Amino acid sequence: MFDMFKMLGKLNELKTEAAQIKQDLKTLEVEGKSASGRVKVTATADKHVHGVWIDSDLAGWANATALQEEVLEATQMALKQAAHLAKETIRARINEKFPEVAGMGLDQWLG
């Protein structure tokens, strides 16, 4: 028989866990690199960019457009990795702590 109070308790636990996951994502760091490896960007899984490293050889580039493209590429890679890490972290935590609600379509919220 469906126990509404038990489910409400689980939802409150889920809300608390979601808040903790949100905090934890701030500590998980990823790095994106341009294809050449001469530009690196670090970001956290909550999708905040925290650092940009540019190879000293690029600092003298006369072509600023090429440097901008490298930085953009590395930033996009870092944020893509951050989004993937966040999604996988959330999925693992929900499946581990709340197996009874893990199959209830929560993946659609992880997008």
Image (spheres, grey):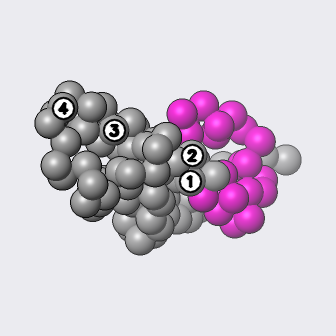
Q: Mark 4 — residue?
A: 63
Q: Mark 1 — residue?
A: 85
Front label number (2 vs 4) = 4
Q: Residue furthest right?
A: 1
Q: Which amino acid lies under the numbered mark 1 shown in the image of this protein?
A: Leu
- Point out residue 104 in the picture as x, y percentages from the top left corner: 72, 38
The residue at the point 52 percent across, 52 percent down is 86
- Point out residue 70 in the picture as x, y percentages from the top left corner: 33, 38
Q: CA distance from mark 1 to mark 3?
A: 23 Å
Q: Earlier in the sequence, mark 2 or mark 3?
A: 3
Q: Mark 3 — residue?
A: 70
Position of 23 with respect to 10 (left or right) is left
Q: Secondary structure at mark 3?
A: helix
Q: Dot 3: within a 10 Å radius of its alpha carbon, few (fewer than 14), some, or many (20 or more) residues? A: many
User: Could you say which quadrant of the image residue 52 lies in?
Assistant: bottom left
The part of the chain drawn in magenta is: 89-111
Position of 90 with respect to 27 (left or right) is right
Q: CA distance from mark 4 to mark 3?
A: 11 Å
Q: Mark 2 — residue?
A: 84
- Point out residue 73 in the picture as x, y percentages from the top left corner: 38, 36
